[in-house]
Amino acid sequence: LTGKIQAMMADPALKGTVVWLLLTARIDLLSEDLLRRGRAGDVIFAMTDPTGRDREEFIHWLLKPVCKTPDEAFLKQVDAETIGFSAADFASLRSDLKVEAEEHALTPEQILNVITNRIPADTTDFRRKQTLHALLKCSDRRLLPEPYEDLEAQRREWKKELAQLGRYPTL
């Protein structure tokens, strides 16, 4: 499959007429040929877990179907209880909350009960490795989560961290 995709990308008849959009959570498994400029496009960006204002908006999205005007204290509780949740965990949790709310309106305590009963998969090391690979492959400095002054030094640090994480998750 990869060979056929690369052949199509190299076809001069398709140049300028086909836009390739490749999405993967396993950028480390892609062929280097697909990652070089001019193959899968000129922009490779890292999608990292939401932080700061983005995370706040994500939590509002999670609660929107069941709690129209959450107060600050409740939002802080939800934030604390969802640390380590992936986007898929949030989406699944939102579905569960919507199902619960079909039967009766949920109180903040009931919402927190649904959240705290959820145990996310222990993928912390694996997700960090995915993020590090994505940061290392990012092709536009402006798309990185922070404006790193010395990007090469930062990339060396990411590579060291990746090597420390090793191939298998720590126990």
Image: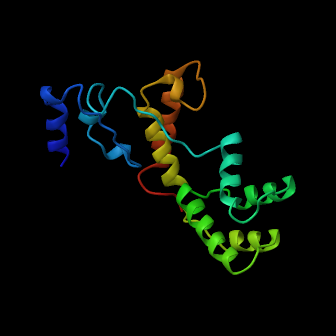
Residue placed furthest toward the top: 149
Give residue 102's position: percent from left, percent from top: 66, 76
Instruction: Name the residue: 49% across, 22% down.
Output: 152
Give residue 24's position: percent from left, percent from top: 38, 47
Instruction: Name the residue: 26% across, 40% down.
Output: 31
Q: Is residue 149 left or right of residue 131?
A: right
Q: Is residue 1 left or right of residue 138?
A: left
Figure coloring: rainbow
Q: Quadrant of residue 21?
A: top left
Give residue 91's position: percent from left, percent from top: 57, 61
- Asked if residue 159 shows in the view, the reply is no
Q: Is residue 62 left or right of residue 28?
A: right
Image quadrant in which the C terminus is located? bottom right
Q: Nearer the viewer, residue 74 or 81?
A: 74
Give residue 97's position: percent from left, percent from top: 66, 70
Q: Quadrant of residue 109?
A: bottom right
Q: Nearer the viewer, residue 122 or 50?
A: 50
Residue 67's place in the image compared with 51, above or below, is below
Residue placed furthest toward the bottom: 103
- Asked if residue 37 shows in the view, the reply is yes
Q: How many marks?
A: 0
Instruction: Name the residue: 34% across, 42% down.
Output: 22
